[in-house]
Structure formats: structure tokens, C-alpha cells
Amino acid sequence: MDYVNALAIITNFILLPGLTYGSQLALGAMGVTLIYAVLRFSNFAHGEIMSFGTMVCILFTWLGQSYGLSLGFLPTAILFIPVAMFFTVLYCLLIEKYVFSYYREKKSNPIIFLIASIGVMFFTAGLIRFIIGPSDQSFNDGVRFIFNVREFKAFTGLNEGFGLKTSQAITFLMTIILCALLFFFLNRTRTGKSMRAFSDNEDLALLSGIDPNKVVLLTWIIAGGLATFAGVLYGLDKIYKPFIFLQMLLPIFSAAIVGGVGNPLGAFFGGYIIALSELFVTFAYKKVLGYILPENLEPSSMMQFLATDYKFSVSFIILVIVLIIKPTGLFNGKTI
Amino acid sequence: MTDVQRRFSIFSTFFLALIFIGFFQSWNVALGIFNLCLISATMALGVNIQLGYAGIFNAGVMGFAALGGLSAVLIAHPPVSETIKLGGKGILFAFMVLAVGSAIIIFIYKSNQTSRFKKITIPLIILILLVLFNLIGSPAIKRVEAFEPAATGFLGGLGLPILFSWLVGGVLAGFVAYFIGKLTLGLRSDYLAIATLGIAEVIIYFLKNENWLTRGVKNVNGLPRPVPYEVDLQGNKWFIEICERYNFPLIETSSIVVKISYCLLFSGVLITLFILSEIALKSPWGRMMRAIRDNEISARAMGKNVKARHLEIFIIGSGIVGLAGAMLTTLEGQFTPTTYQPLRFTFTVWVMVIIGGTGNNYGSLIGGFLVWFLWVEAEPLGLYLVELLTSPLSDTNPLRIQLTTNAAHMRYIMMGLLLLLVLRFAPKGIFPEGR
């Protein structure tokens, strides 16, 4: 029985990738949830907005690289995240101005907003494919690993080990900073409080003199900024594929709903819940059990709950279960 | 303009555009587009029944269309006798175990035991069932998938005429819709859209990965056709004679004849469905549906069973989408799970219904026709626009090359713009719902 080795495998194949993917989902889901809280609709275009931010970042990275810019062992793209954020937020504000503000003034049904967001999704998807093309782009030019499995094994003398990718470390760090900033903003500053008040009760907020336009503007700025981070970090960690973001939309929605729609803290935890359960359910435990169980009990099959191909479906199963059992989510959000 | 005049003028504009394509591109292209227009319109009719009659937002169109495609494989593909010998019994046995287990679960669920007892036993039985199913099924499935994986590696179908699969596709999609509806119809609009979107993805993953059933990403090719093959026509004496007498080019004429026969089949289905749904819309049943859609609470107060009606309409609409999916697979002659993407199926069909006018069957027809027409013609149109815009640049300019290669993606931009513009300036669509 060897618990340390088993733990090392789990860290390498479940915990680290799960936490990375979870952070990316959490950043996306917080954007979705904020838009839901303030504008009261499910934004189907959010995945494409993430994609848009990543695309801008890639374009500027290419430009920077052609001038010989580099951050050493870090990916160059990090340098251009603020630029990408600026353009994404600008794009979000344009969408707000030319698409959503009309329906907001008319106080349209949420479903009309939803359809409009699908229009935006189509348009953005086309724009992205038109500018950068439909193929994959790899733009991580930094050092791949901070330490890899081999180095870890040599260092600790264990049979198994785990490696820490640079992109993973960057993702953790950025997510912690961003979430701390966001929650500080929402809970401690006057503007953040006015945003929460607006989301709680629109009429009362209007009566107490909160400017709705300012709140809406801020929401788009935050959501667009978070979406850029989520997209770029995902692209750095894996690869940038324009069509993957429509698929990511579903785990993101699941994360937002599992945590409770309209509740940023819920979305934050929802992201990790979805990502970790995806990996926990589809991981083959054969090797881990081989270490933990006594020798004669070693399993012969893969010991997998669900084939790896069904990874994406896990989030939907969780989503459906939550929707049926507790539609307000784990952190008591709103019901749509 | 009266309604009839309006309908006549818009439909005739569409057909003029099609004839224009026929003269300037080719009749083959025009008929090919029109066949897919017919299928799209069928799908749009199905979605319109859900979205327009009852206000149900079903984002799982893709999944139901894929189930229709699956039924085309299961009905029409000749059976692969070797794999059935290898694993047929095992798989059948595993499914029988599953059926018995489900029956036990339903029995416990319906029984009057305490809810705590149910909460413990039902998940336990599900877990045991999953393990049993894997133990019994997976060796048989492995044997099936290992048999000549490059050529077969799946069980095949029943080898019946493919036309039969249209009906089966509708029934299969309706059957699945029953369970999905039971599960999700209690949710409100946004959640329902997200949940059905997710379930459609699960269906596609299932079809992509269960190789013993669908060959997964290896696709099923060479499904039999309900109409003659071009090659047979070209070898047919009688056909050659006709072509010679009227001086038609043989090869082109044969493919046009094939397309026209498809067109007749699809039109038959579409017209039948259209008439049926018009009758349904005008019947007391249709009025009740609209009453429920417009004010659920008062409809319930009038004694209407809203839940049951919603389930009913969810099944009917999904069944029609399944039928259209089977038609699509029949036309393509192959089943490729990877082509099922939400942008192409679910959301485009929504665009069709909304542009045509939700709640109006004529709207679904013209929406299906127009949107598919634009979807196809966006590529040449986009290319033309790009060339016009970049004509001052030299041929080797990287920007020009980039834009020209990506011009095909204009269709997404166009769909988005069209949807946004219609939603903003004509929210009732081309043909508004009648009063």
C-alpha cells in the first residue's frame, strides 16, 4: 500500500488539470452570472466573447513577436491581455449599445434577449472565423513546464510524480488575483454595492438614485474583462480553437447554474465543481487502486466510471440533476 | 396587400431566385439547394410547433435530427451477420437486464414506500444496473467493435427500405422527447433552452462514441437510396433513348432526375405535414395551445392540463424534427455524427422559424427556404464581396488572401445580422401570426 504514489497520480491527472480548467470555467461563469444578475438574461454569446478576446490577444502577440518581443519563460501573450481586454470590452459595449439597450429600454421578455444573444453569437462566430480563420492556433511560446514529472520523480524519489505547467501556475495566480479584486469590488466599494443592489431589486435601486446605465456599463466591462482572461488562459493551457468555445458554453452555464445563477461566489465554486467532477468521473483508477489496495486485490479492468469521451456530458448530467432537485443552485441564486 | 397576395409574392420571389441560380450556376445546384430547403422547412415546421404554438424553447433540435439519422442507419443498412453472431446475443441480453432493472425502478418509484426508502434504493439499483450492464455488455461490444473495424465493426441495421426509416426516425425522436420532456419541461424558458442544449450534446456524444451501434466517427457510408442511382440511369436503355431524342446531356440529366425524385418525395412529406399542422393550428387544440402560451395561469384556471399539453407538443415537434433528420441522412446517403453542430442545426433552425414568423406555418416554410438558400449562397456572395472590396490590392497581398480564404464564414455573420435585424425591426417575422 502506497498512498503517496497514489496521491501523486491523482494530483497529476485530476487535481492540477481540474483546478486549471475549473479556474477557466469559473472566470467564464462569473461573467455569465453577472450578466444574468444585472441584465437578467442568459447570454449565449459569452463563449464567443471569450473567443473574441483570445483572438485579439493572439493577433497582438503575433505582432509583438514580429518585433522580437518576448517575456522569457512566460508566454508573450500575457503582456497583451490588457490590450485584448480593452478591445473585448469595447466590443461588448458596442453590442450593448446597438443590440441589448433597445430591448432593455422596452423591458422585453428575457427570451427575446436570449434570441438576440444568439444573433450576437452567430455574428461574433462569423467575425472570428473571418478574421483569424477556423483552424487551431497555438500561441504559448513560454517554457512549458515549471517542473515536469521526471524532475519531480528525481527530486522526491517516488515512482509516480506530477508536473506543473507554466500555464497552470499562471491560471491559478491570475484567477486568485482576479477573484480577490472582483469580490473586493462587489462587497467593499460603493459602486460594487450599487451593482448588487441593482441586481437585488431594480426598482428600489432606482429609487435610491443608482444610475442603471452606469451599472449596466460596469457589468459589461467586468464580464468582458473576465471573458478575455478565461479565453486567453484556456488557449494558453490547451490550444485556441474557434469552435471549442461554443462547446465551452455548456460547462460554463452548468457552473453558473450549479452555483446559483446571479451569484458570483456560486459561479466561482461551480466552475471547480464541474471541472473536478468531469475528471473524477472519467479518470481510470486502475493504477491508483494498484497502489492503494493490497496486491492480491489489484483490479484488472480500467476502473473508470465513464469513458473519457463522455467528459463533456458530465456537466450536463450535473446540470440536469441540479435543475431538478435544487433549481436555485448550491448558493441560492435566482430561479430563471 | 392581403395575406394571400403577400404569401404569393414572397414565395414567387424565392422561386425566381432559385430559377436564377438554375440559369446562372446550374440546375443541379439549384435542385440540390431546393432539396435541402425542403428538409430545412420540415425541421422549421417541427420547431415552429414547439416555439410558435406553445412557446417551448427547444435547443435540442440537433439531437433529435441526429436520432432521425440514426434510425436511417438502423433501418436501412444491411445487417452485418458476423458481428451479430459475435456480440448480438450479449448486447441484447445486456439491454434486457437494463429493461428489467428500469421496470423495477419504476415499480419502486410508483409504490407507496417511504420517500427515504426510495431515495436509498433507487440510486443503489441504478449503480448495480450500470455495473451489471458493463459486465455483460462490454465483452460483447468489444467483440463487435474488433471485427474488421475498418469496414464494419458494428451491428448494422435491418436492411429494410430506407423510406420506412423516416417514420421510425420520427417515432424514435418522439420517444426520446417523451423522457427529455418529462425531465425538463417543468423548467422555465432559459433553463429549458440550456438543459435541452446539453441533452442534445449528450445524444451526439453517445452517437459519436458507441461504435457498435453507429460506427462513431468512422461514419456509416453507402446507405441504400429510395431513388435510382445515376449510374443505373445512365446504363438504362430507355433513359438513354429519351436523352438522345431530346438532346439532353446524359450525365447531367441523370443527376437532375435523381434530384427531382428526391424533391418529389420530400415535397410530399412537407406538404402533408404542412396541411396537418395548419389543421391542428386552426382546430380547438391549436387554440388551446395558443391560450396556454399566452397566459398559462388562466389556461390552467380553465382546467387545461398545461404540463401534459406541453409534453404532447414537445413530442410532436421533436418527432417532426427526427423525421427531417432521417430525410437528411437519406439524401446524403451517409451518417456522419461529427457534422451535427449546434450552430448548423439548432440555432439555424431557430433563425428560420423566427425570421419566417413564429406561430405561422407559412412563415416556417419561407423561413426554411430563405435561410437555407442564404446559408448556401453566402459563400459565393461573400467571395464576391471580398473580391470587390479588395480589388485595389494585389493578388499576393496577405490580407486579400486571408479574407478570400475565410469568405465562406460570411454565412455566420449574415445569419447573425439577419436575426438581429428581424428581431429589432420586424419582430413578428415575414409572415406575422394570424389572429
Image (cartoon, grey):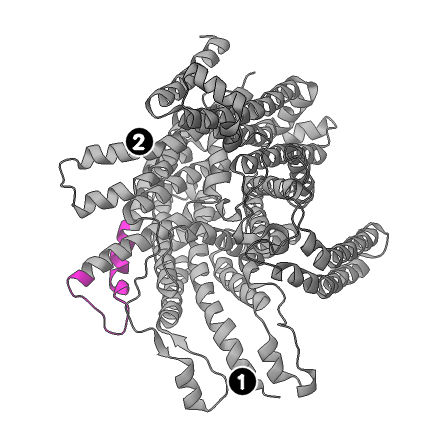
Judged by depth in the image, the label closer to the viewer, 1 or 2, is 2
- Based on the picture, tell me whether residue B44 belongs to the magenta stretch: no
Query: Where, quadrant-wise, is the N terminus of chain A in this rendering?
Result: bottom right
Residue B53 occupies quadrant:
top right
**Type of residue at label 1?**
Asn
Tell me the residue at 41%/84% (across/down).
A150
Percent of width and height locating residue B302:
72, 26
> How many labels were placed on the picture?
2
Distance between the Cα atoms at labels 1 and 2?
A: 60 Å
Percent of width and height locating residue A310:
57, 59
Task: Identify the disc placed on residue B381.
Answer: 2
Q: Which residues are magenta?
A: A65-87
In the foreground, B327 or B277: B327
Q: Secondary structure at mark 1?
A: helix
Q: On the same chain: label 1 and label 2?
A: no
Residue B19 occupies quadrant:
top left
